[in-house]
Amino acid sequence: MSISRPYTWLLFDADGTLFDYEQAEAAALQNTFAQFDVPFPAGALPVYRVINGQLWQALEEGQVTQAKLAVRRFEMLFETLGRPMPPQFSSAFLDQLARCSVLIDGAETTLRALQPRYRIAILTNGISVVQRSRLARSAIQRYIHELIISEEVGAAKPDAAFFDFAFERLGRPSRANVLMIGDSLSSDMRGASRYGLDTCWFNPARLPRPEDIALTFEIATLEELTTLLGVAS
């Protein structure tokens, strides 16, 4: 099935949609522990992910700043591990993470197929030094027309202020001509839907569809997006 919508812009989330953040995060955390010669306990990664997830949710709700989040997540992790946090651990982790640009399966081929027909932007609740470095190192940089990062905006998805900033950067396109693609229901789908945009939920785990968020489309692989839009991959 394909659709005939007059989209001119496709807005992609970064982590979990185009970039394999889980793989990058695990490698960066392990490498940072090794950099400071600190043992990396088997349970450190899942504990960190719980802490990090809670803080990113707080960021989406405007309860914590990005600068505070970047440090506090490791303070909480080392408190849980019962060890002092090495100085500069947070900045070292960001440096390690910035080197990781592993893509989700199908990201490059999908963007290559879409780019001749659509303008493509990445909208991310991320940290500037990480997101810009990862994109620059990746195979998809050539297909991206705009990169809009919450740390640089001063607001994060799903806040309407983030989308206001993005639409100014994009040249104020009609909202009817813009499609948001992302894996996060709370930031990508809820934020875009409230802003009046069509949405495409990237749901590789095939989770149950929520009833409280208006989703226009749903895909389990990125290649499905080209089929949906009637573009040959």
Image (cartoon, helix red, strand yellow):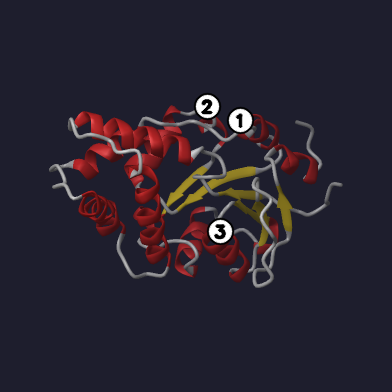
In the shown orientation, is residue 141 left or right of residue 228? left
Residue 31 image position (x, y, % from top left): 30, 30
Q: Characterize the local packing of mark 2: few (<14), some (14-19) or many (20 or more) Cα atoms within 10 angstroms.
A: some
Residue nearest the viewer, comparing 63 with 118: 63
Inspect the image, locate mark 1, and give the three-letter code of the amino acid beneath it. Glu
Q: CA distance from mark 1 to mark 3?
A: 21 Å
Residue nearest the viewer, comparing 200 with 220: 220
Q: CA distance from mark 2 to mark 3?
A: 23 Å
Per the image, the residue denoted by label 1 is: 108
Q: Label 2, secondary structure: give it.
A: loop
Residue 22 image position (x, y, % from top left): 47, 40
User: Mark on residue 139?
Assistant: 2
**In the rendered image, which quarter contains the C terminus?**
top right
Callout 1 touching callout 2 (CB < 8 Å): yes
In the shown orientation, is residue 182 left or right of residue 100? right
Q: Residue at x 40, y 39 (%)?
A: 25
Q: Residue at x 38, y 63 (%)?
A: 59
| Earlier sequence position, callout 1 versus callout 2 | 1
Q: CA distance from mark 1 to mark 2?
A: 7 Å
Q: Label 1, secondary structure: give it.
A: helix
Residue 163 image position (x, y, % from top left): 51, 62
Residue 193 image position (x, y, % from top left): 63, 67
The image quadrant of residue 208 is: bottom right
Per the image, the residue denoted by label 3 is: 188
Total labels: the figure holds: 3
The image quadrant of residue 104 is: top right
